[in-house]
Amino acid sequence: MLHPLRHAPLSFPRDAQDASGGGDDLGKLPEWDLTDLYASPDAKEFKRDMDWLEKACADFAADYEGKMARLDAAGMLDCVLRYEKIDIIAGRMMSFAGLRYYQNTTDAERAQFMANAQDKITTFTTPLVFYSLELNRIDDAVISGWFDDNADLARYRPVFDRLRAMKPYQLSDELEKFLHDQSTVGAAAWNRLFDETIAGLTFDIDDEELNIEGTLNLLTDPDRERRELGARELAKVFGENVKLFARVHNTLAKEKEIEDRWRGMETPQTGRHLSNHVEPEVVEALRNAVVEAYPKLSHRYYELKRKWLGLDVMQVWDRNAPLPMEDPTLVGWDRAQATVMEAYADFAPEMAEIAKPFFTEGWIDAAVKPGKAPGAFAHPTVTEVHPYVMLNYLGKPRDVMTLAHELGHGVHQVLAAGQGELLSSTPLTLAETASVFGEMLTFRKLLAAAETTEQRKVLLAGKVEDMINTVVRQIAFYDFECKLHEARSAGELTPDDINALWMSVQAESLGPAFEFMEGYETFWSYIPHFVHSPFYVYAYAFGDGLVNALYAVYEEGDADFQEKYFDMLKAGGSKHHKELLAPFGLDASDPTFWDKGLSMISGMIDELEAMEG
C-alpha cells in the first residue's frame, strides 16, 4: 500500500539528550537549501505535481482496479512502474512540506502548508488502496510465473514478498480505504499535536526562558547545580503537561490496539517486526541478551562514573554529566566536518566523496533555532533527489558523533537510491548500520590520536556511555513500550499508571548507582519514538550490536571488507538481513551473535576499570 507519509525522518536522537542554543564560536553553521525539491511553497512545480498526482492516481485506479489478476508479466511491470512514479511524486511533495515544517514547527503557515499537502495526498492516494489488496489475492503460482517471464519485474520480488507478508492481516477493500482516508485525523494528527506541544514548551532557568533542547542540554552541563536545575525544571513542566501526554499515548495505543485486533496481529509488536523484515525470535534474543547483560554493562559503568564524579549516589541529572577530566572546549563546525570526513576517507575515499555534497550543497541544517524540531535525523526524501540531514549542533564531542551518525545515514541513503523508490528503503534494523558504523570510524580515529591516558579514558568512557544509551537505554525503552501497550489493552491508563511503568524499567536498566528524583517518573513524556514509531527503539540496539560484530570482522583484516560493505549499503531494502550479513560470516538469528556485540562494550569497560588500577 502506498504511504505518502512513509517519507518521515529516519532517525530521531537516541535519547533526545543533547542540544541548546549554539554560539558564534562554532563558526558558520549550514542551513538547508530545499530548492532541489521545490523552490518555494508557491512554486508552480509544486502545484503542477499536485495536479499530476490527482490525475495519475485516478487513472491508475481506472486502469487496474479489479483487473490485476488478468495482467501478464509485462502488464504487471508497467503497473509497478506507474505505482513507483506516484510514490516518488507524493514523497517529493511531502518531503518538502515536512522538512520546511521541521525547520520551524511553531510557524503556523508551515504547519498549515504541511497539513494541507498531507490531506490532499491522502485523498488522492485513497483510490490506490486496492493495489496491495488485489495483489495479495493473486495466486502464488501466477506471481512466480510473472517473475519467470520477466527479469525486470523479478527485480521487484522483495516488494511483492513484503506486501504478501501482510496478507494474513489484510482487511476488506472498504475497510482498508477507510483506514487510509481517516489517517490524517488519526495517528498523524496526534503526532502533530505532540510535536507542536513539545516545540512550544518553555522552561524557566535563572529567569531565562529556554526551549526543550536548551533545557535538556543542561543535563550535560559541567556544573552539577545547573544539571539539577535543568532536571527539576524539566520534571516541573512535564508534570504540568503530563495529562496531555498521557492522552496522546492512551489514544495512539488504543488506536493501534483496535487496528491490530481487526487485522488479527498476534502482538502489538507484530507490525513493527513485519515492517523491519525481522523475525520476532531474533528481536527477543536481542532483548534477552541485553537485559541479561545490564549488570556487566550499565551497572558496572555507572559505578565507575559515580566514583569519577566523587558521589555517594548518582542522581538522574548525573547520567550524562561530563567527566571531571573532560576537556570542555567546544568543537567548531569546521573541525567537526574535518574530523568526520577524514575518518570516512581513511576507511574508503569513496565514502568521503559521497558525504562531501552534504557540506557544500545545503544538505545539512545544523544550527539551533527557535521552533526547530529537536534532536537529529537523516531524511532520504526520494531517490530522484538526495537526503537531508538535520542536527542541533552545539560543538560538544557528542555532537561530532551525531554528525558522523546522521551522515552515515545520508551516505547509506545515497547508495541505496540506485535500487529505485520501492526497493531503496532499508528496514529499521539495518537502517542504523551505516550510521553507527560512521560513528565507530570517527571514534576509532579519535582514539588512535589520543596522546595521554586521560584522553583515552575520556574517549572510551564517552563511547561506552553512547553505547549504553544506544543499547541498554533503548531496550529499556522497548520494554517500557511493551508494558505500556499491554497495560492499555486492559483499559485507560492514568498518568500515574504510565509513570509507574516507566520507573519499572529505570532502576533495572541503570542499576544501583542511581537514586531517582521526584518527577523523573514523567520523563517518558518527551521521547518522540513512542509517539511517531511504536517499537522503533530496538532498531538502535539491533544496529549497534550488528555494527560491533561487523567492525570486529573489519579489524580482523578482511581484504574485501570495504567492497562487501558498500554492496550491503547499495542493496537498500532489496535483501533480508541474513543475506546481507552472510558475506561477512555473520548471522543475527544466532543467539550468540548478540553476545559478540555486547562483549565489545564490556571489553571497553574492562579497560576503563584497569585504568583505575
Image: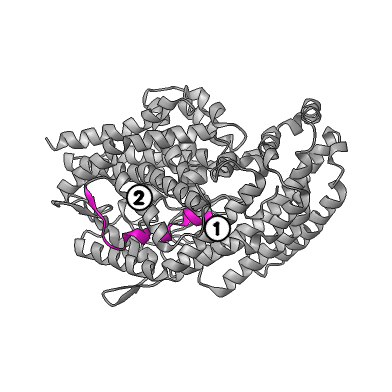
Q: Is residue 378 magenta?
A: no
Q: Is 150 in front, or is 335?
A: 150
Label placed on residue 504: 2
Mark 1 crowd level (few <14, some 14–19, many ≥20, 10 Å Cα): many
Q: Is 587 in front, or is 154?
A: 587
Q: Looking at the picture, which amino acid does disc 2 mark?
A: Ser
- Span highlighted in magenta in the image: 513-532
Label placed on residue 365: none
Q: Looking at the picture, which amino acid does disc 1 mark?
A: Leu
Left or right relative to 280: residue 393: left
Q: Is residue 522 magenta?
A: yes
> Could you say where residue 217 lies in the image, as x and y percent from the top left?
32, 61
> Could you say where residue 106 lies in the image, as x and y percent from the top left?
50, 71
Indicate the colouring scheme: one colour
Which residue is painted at 36% across and 38% down in the image?
Answer: 291
Q: Is residue 398 visible?
A: yes
Check if mark 1's residue and mark 2's residue have beta carbons within 8 Å: no
First in sequence, mark 1 or 2: give its number.
Answer: 1
Left or right relative to 132: residue 67: right
